[in-house]
Image: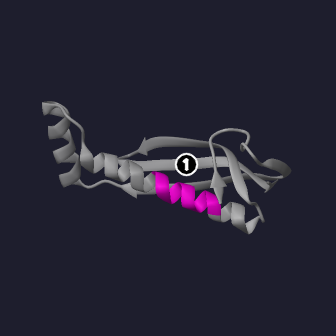
Amino acid sequence: MLVTTTSTLEGYQVTEYVGVVSGETILGANVVRDFMASLTDFFGGRSGTYEGKLAEAREIALQEMQEQARRKGADAVIGVDLDFETIGGMLMCIATGTAVRINK
């Protein structure tokens, strides 16, 4: 399935707008990981642990969004937006986009 943040797909024509689709994920963080990330923040550098969690949350949300689009009969998702939030120590990622059918 084609997925893009743009509103068009070069070389393809949108033939039908199926509707808005989304995927959500919430991942918990643990005390040890939070402590290690705070040390990294204090001493400088990148927190590989949190970068990994961000990537994991993004991938899960995108997969769920694509699955919802497939169930609706779409070939692609355009205009994808990713939002990240923290809620009480939990990391949330929401992927939203417009499911479409396309012709080449």
Q: Could you say whether the residue bearing mark 1 is in a helix, strand or loop?
A: strand
Q: What predominant SS class does the magenta segment belong to? A: helix
Magenta run includes residue 6? no
Name the residue that disc number 1 marks: 94
Quadrant in which the N terminus is drawn? bottom right
Quadrant in which the C terminus is drawn? bottom right
Check the image and tell me how it is coloured. one colour
Magenta run includes residue 61? yes
For label 1, the crowd category at 10 Å Cα-Cα, with few meaning under 14, some 14 to 19 and many 20 or more, is: many
Task: From the top left corner, tell me how far across and down residue 80 is, in percent.
Answer: 63, 44
Task: From the top left corner, tell me how far across and down residue 36 is, in percent.
Answer: 16, 46
Horizontal arrangement in the rendering, residue 51 relative to residue 13 (left or right): left
Magenta highlight range: 58-66
Task: From the top left corner, tell me how far across and down residue 64 is, in percent.
Answer: 58, 61
Horizontal arrangement in the rendering, residue 29 relative to residue 61 (left or right): left
Is residue 36 or residue 6 the one in the foreground?
6
Q: Is residue 35 above or below residue 42?
A: below
Q: Amino acid at mark 1?
A: Ile
The residue at the point 55 percent across, 55 percent down is 62
Residue 24 lies in quadrant: bottom right
Q: How many marks?
A: 1
Is residue 75 or residue 24 the one in the foreground?
75
The residue at the point 35 percent across, 52 percent down is 53
Furthest-right residue in this view: 15
Task: From the top left corner, tell me how far across and down residue 18 is, in percent.
Answer: 81, 55
The residue at the point 74 percent across, 41 percent down is 8
Horizontal arrangement in the rendering, residue 86 relative to residue 35 (left or right): right
